Amino acid sequence: MLFGQSVFQSVVERLKQEKEEESAEEQPPPAGHRIAGFSSGFVVGTHPEAPPPANGHLDAYLAFLPDPAPPPEPEPPPQPEPMPAYLEKTSLADVSAELAIDETDTATTLAEKRRAFARLNHPDGVKPEFRHNATLRMTAANLLIDQAIRMLRTRAHFR
């Protein structure tokens, strides 16, 4: 005990004296923002008693975040792919020229020509926007090949 007081009491008395001395010497706080402590965040204003704004904590948090990046520019819509040139030829004459059916063809060679033509031109094998033309081409090819097969049978029957 020091001078009739416990150590704790003497420390409390000394802290009270220091606080009174500080309040007597206190100067007005600088203008602008100040950090008031962990619980109050940033306080706006020049007076320490000024109430913080309603969203002061949010503003303080957002002040430390970087500026958001501008939204990316939208990509231009992709240009549609042009139709292959061979799909534009839909007439019987064009398809007939591609198939090159002649008198020397047999049922086997005509079947091979049909399969080869279907590999390139079948509507299920092309993009949806080109299916109409592919259907027209396959219809013409099947018509021409079926007609050639019928003529082979007719010739074979008359021999």
Image (cartoon, helix red, strand yellow):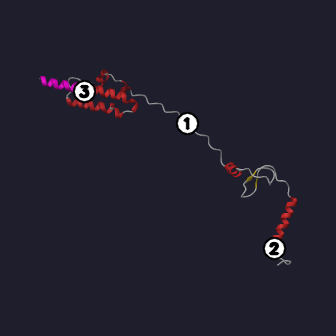
Q: Nearer the viewer, residue 16 or 91?
A: 16
Are there few (<14), some (14-19), or many (20+) residues within 10 Å of tag 1? Answer: few
Q: Residue furthest left?
A: 159
* Residue shown at the point (30%, 27%) measured from the top left: 139
Question: At which x and y percent is residue 58?
Answer: 68, 50
Q: Is residue 133 above or below residue 20?
A: above
Q: Quadrant of residue 159?
A: top left
Q: Is residue 79 above or below residue 70?
A: above
**Count of labels shown?**
3
Q: Which residues are magenta?
A: 142-158
Q: Amino acid at mark 2?
A: Gln
- Is tag 3's residue or tag 2's residue first in the polypeptide sequence? 2
Q: Is residue 9 above or below residue 71?
A: below
Provide the residue designation for mark 1.
74
User: What secondary structure is marked by label 2?
Assistant: helix
Marker disc for residue 145: 3
Question: At which x and y percent is residue 60?
Answer: 70, 51
User: What secondary structure is marked by label 3?
Assistant: helix
Q: Quadrant of residue 153?
A: top left
- Is tag 2's residue or tag 1's residue first in the polypeptide sequence? 2
* Residue shown at the point (23%, 31%) measured from the top left: 111
Q: Amino acid at mark 3?
A: Ile
The answer to if 149 sits in the magenta stretch is: yes
Marker disc for residue 9: 2
State which mark lies toward you, 3 or 2.
Answer: 2
Marker disc for residue 156: none
Q: Is residue 49 left or right of residue 62?
A: right
